[in-house]
Image: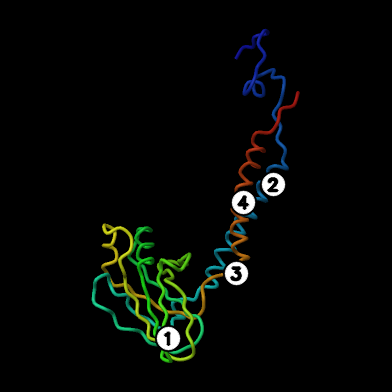
Amino acid sequence: MTGDPDVTPIGFAATDAPGALVRRRRNPLWLVLAILFGGAGAAAIAWFILAQLDNAAGREDAVANGRVAALRGAPTPAVRFTGQGDYTVWLELDGVRLSNNRELIVAATNCAAAFERGGSTRFRGARQGASVTIGDRSTVGTFSMPAGAVALTCSQQPFGRRGRQRALTAERTFFVTPGDPGIGWQPWVGLFGGIGLLILAAPAFGRYRTGYLRPR
């Protein structure tokens, strides 16, 4: 490009054209901050995920296994076990690929626990707050039982739009594990803090890429 003595280059040409008056410089501090923000954010989110995985009982920890009755289908036999304390019902969702169908099946699952020494409790997936999902299994809910035996039954009940209820017409497998899969508040703070750090990393890297102009 031939220079015109009566024209002063601006923008891109101001820094890259022969005879440019200024040069773009980048402050490495912004790059360091971007790397720190990004790394810390990713580590915090990974901590949250590992905390979920470590706290959730595995399939091998199940104390009982049963079948969830299909919507408008025949009742399934109650599962019985003995224990005391908190127990969580997990629903097997292998073969269900669409996330909206998974959410519908969990929300429509209703369970009833009848205690040997009297009393009962009911819970359903739609009212558990946030379902914990690991692989092909999701929680339906957690219940507390007194010492003794319990009879537990689960079934699919109408939920959502009628046109979507076709996903509820098949029996599902469930299993019961001791304890509550929920985690403390600290990993949640790590999750939201990690997301915030990742958001900050983007403008820090953008600031590094933009740099600033200085006279040659």
Relative to the observer, which residue lies in front, 132 or 148? 148
Judging by the rendered image, the residue that carries numbered circle 2 is 33
- The alpha-carbon separation of the residues under discs 3 and 4 comes to 20 Å
Question: Disc 3 marks which amino acid?
Answer: Gly
**Above-or-below relation of 126 to 199:** below
| Quadrant in which residue 186 is drawn | bottom right
Q: Position of residue 122 (x, y in %)?
A: 40, 77
Image point (63%, 38%), residue name: 206
Q: Quadrant of residue 189?
A: bottom right
Q: What kind of colouring is applied to the model shown?
A: rainbow
Residue for badge 3? 184
Q: Residue 62: percent from the left, percent from the top?
A: 44, 81
Query: Badge 1 is on which residue?
Result: 119
Q: CA distance from mark 2 to mark 1?
A: 58 Å
* CA distance for labels 3 and 1: 30 Å
Earlier in the chain: of badge 2 and badge 1, it is: 2
Alpha-carbon span between mark 1 and mark 4: 46 Å
Residue occupied by mark 4: 196
* Picture residue at 65% right of the left edge, 33% below the top: 210
Tell how many labels.
Answer: 4
**Disc on the earlier residue, 3 or 4:** 3
Q: Quadrant of the N terminus?
A: top right
In the image, what residue type sits under mark 4?
Gly
Q: Single out the residue that lies furthest toward the top.
A: 6
Q: Neighbour class for label 3 at 10 Å: few (<14), some, many (≥20)?
A: few
Q: Residue at x 40, y 83 (%)?
A: 64
Residue type at mark 2 is Leu
